[in-house]
């Protein structure tokens, strides 16, 4: 999982499929919102457009989003970090 944060919200990218991601976070975002997140590990900025969010388990929200303005390099980096976290 990739730990990210934006504003006062902390979350983790739990799955990546193409340009779609699922984020578990301690705050919700409305559909259509654009969020600019920071990868906790190295400070890389990643932008998302929220497709929807719902209440998950234990005060967590499940946010479905798609990446915005992501270079091929950044996409590859996200996939590498995600794959490494699964091991």
Image (spheres, grey):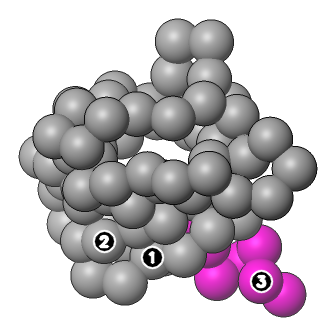
Q: Quadrant of the N terminus?
A: bottom right
Q: In terms of image quadrants, where is residue 20?
A: bottom left
The answer to whether residue 86 is magenta is: yes
* Numbered disc total: 3
**Dominant SS in magenta:** helix
Counting residues from the start of the chain, the first of labels 2 and 3 encountered is 2
Please report the residue visible at 70 percent of the width from the left and 34 percent of the height from the top: 26
Magenta residues, as a range?
80-87
Q: Is residue 1 left or right of residue 43?
A: right
Q: Is 9 placed above or below 64 here?
A: above
| SS class, disc 1 | strand
Q: Is residue 3 visible?
A: no
Pick the residue in front: 61 or 17: 61
Q: Which residue is mark 2?
A: 20
Q: Which residue is mark 3?
A: 86
Residue at mark 3 to residue at mark 1: CA–CA distance = 12 Å
Residue at mark 2 to residue at mark 1: CA–CA distance = 6 Å
Q: Is 52 placed above or below 6 here?
A: below
Please report the residue visible at 64 percent of the width from the left and 82 percent of the height from the top: 83
Counting residues from the start of the chain, the first of labels 3 and 1 encountered is 1
Residue 16 circle label: 1
Q: Position of residue 73 (x, y in %)?
A: 28, 62
Residue at mark 2 to residue at mark 3: CA–CA distance = 18 Å
Mark 2 and mark 1 residues within 8 Å of each other at the beta carbon: yes
Pick the residue in front: 68 or 51: 51
């Amino acid at each position: 999982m990739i730990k990210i944060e934006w504003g006062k919200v902390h979350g983790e990218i739990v799955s990546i499929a193409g340009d779609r991601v699922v984020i578990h976070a301690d705050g919700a975002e409305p559909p259509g919102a654009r969020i600019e997140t920071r990868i906790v590990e190295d400070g890389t900025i990643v932008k998302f457009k929220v497709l929807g969010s719902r209440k998950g388990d234990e005060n967590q929200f499940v946010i479905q989003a798609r990446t915005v303005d992501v270079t091929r390099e950044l996409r590859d980096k996200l996939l590498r970090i995600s794959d490494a976290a699964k091991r």
